[in-house]
Image (cartoon, helix red, strand yellow):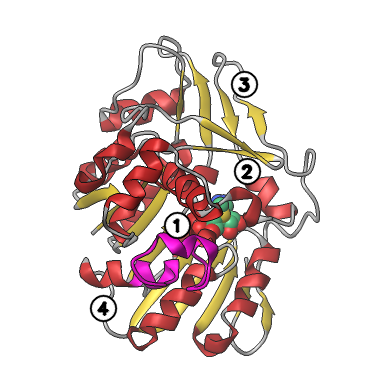
Amino acid sequence: MILYTDQDFMYRFDPMAIHDGPKSGEGSVTSSRGADGAARLSTTADYHRFTPVDLMSEFTICESFSGPGSPYGIILEKPSSYGAMVGDFLVRMGLLKDRATVCEVGGGYGSLMHGLLGSHENRIERVYMIDLSLSLLKRQRDRLSPWKSRITSIRGDIHELLGAVAGVDLFIVNEVMGDLDTLTGIDPSHMPPEAEELIRAYDLDIPAVPFNLNIGAIRLVEALCRTGIPALLTEHSSDPVIPDDMAYLARDLDLDAYPREIKLFRHSEYTIRFSHLVKVARAHGRTARTGALLDLIPVRKGKNLETIFRLRACDTEDHEIIYELLDHIREYRWLVIS
Ligand SMILES: C[S@@+](CC[C@H](N)C(=O)[O-])C[C@H]1O[C@@H](n2cnc3c(N)ncnc32)[C@H](O)[C@@H]1O
């Protein structure tokens, strides 16, 4: 683990930094699961450890609203940043206590935390930023320099670190789960032992045809549940939910699908089956609430958005931006575990 504090850079213990490059090919994406059938393991761990990550090519919702002046802000009721909107949502959900210690996992460019601290800094006393990518941790520290004394940055894999995190009031895991391990091409009649064990333990529904399973996200939710600490998780879902007042967004969308691959620069992500995660959290005795990410993004009301989406009326650049964003964001969900 590499740990930075407000004072300086402290090198403590870094099982990953012992080797200074990936073991088998930079940014390797897929590795064989071995002899238990056709299933394979998709992992992005080496990609995030060793490749300078470009989030702009990934179209994250967080970066789309990185500040109040972002081009996608034209869809909002009033200019805001994603971090500020997340903060308002956390307050509404009763999750942001006074003098809170917040731990964000996979903070990317630091934009969410920048917006959150910029709008709710009086409530947040301490921040831990955990990330696998050294280059992104550095970028987060630059972006969060106005609050330097409150930030501790920790380099490591969340699966290895979570059990050791203490004294935290809230975890934020924004658009990270799709990067975690996914078992792909699982034959339902010949499943790898890990998939079979999870499916049995949590009574997870599976299709009759080969499918992908978000084992990394499931393991993360298990670990979060064991901490007993509340968490907000968001991601691109395979089973989207559509806000009641925007039912038109359901057009041509499968609302009950299994994780699908999204190919990105030198790695792949997988959409997340949120209904599986809800089952896991509830099996651990936790309260799981979930909804559409649009619940926390106050978009302009009125017929205008619906007309643009229904007719794909993109005769101006603004319309194009609105259509593109709605088409993307409608598949995103949030999950709160408390
Ligand atoms: C798709 S980016 C999302 C960044 C940011 N949260 C956003 O929404 O723009 C995924 C982030 O998770 C980090 N990450 C991926 N796998 C991780 C792991 N196993 N442990 C810790 N961080 C991880 C990446 O380095 C990156 O910062």
- Decide if ligand 1 comes within 8 Å of the CB at mark 3: no
Q: Name the residue under label 4.
A: 97
The residue tagged 3 is 34
Q: Give the range drawn in magenta.
A: 65-87
- Name the residue type under label 4: Lys
Q: Gap between marks 4 and 1, in whole Å?
A: 19 Å
On the picture, is 317 further left or further right than 95?
right
Give the mark nearest the N terminus, 3 or 4.
3
The percent position of residue 318, horizontal first and vertical second, equals 51, 55
User: Residue 297: which quarter of the image?
Assistant: bottom left
Relative to residue 165, is residue 11 drawn left or right?
Answer: right
The amino acid marked with disc number 2 is: Thr
Q: Which x, y percent locates residue 162?
A: 45, 59
Q: How far apart are marks 4 and 2 (CA)?
A: 34 Å
Q: Distance between the residues labelled 2 and 3?
A: 18 Å
Ligand 1 lies under 8 Å from the Cβ of mark 1:
yes
Location of residue 191 by image quarter: top left
Q: Which badge, 3 or 1, comes first in the chain's sequence?
A: 3
Please tell me which residue is depicted at 51% across the width and 34% down the height of the picture: 182
- In this figure, which residue is indicated by the disc labeled 2? 44
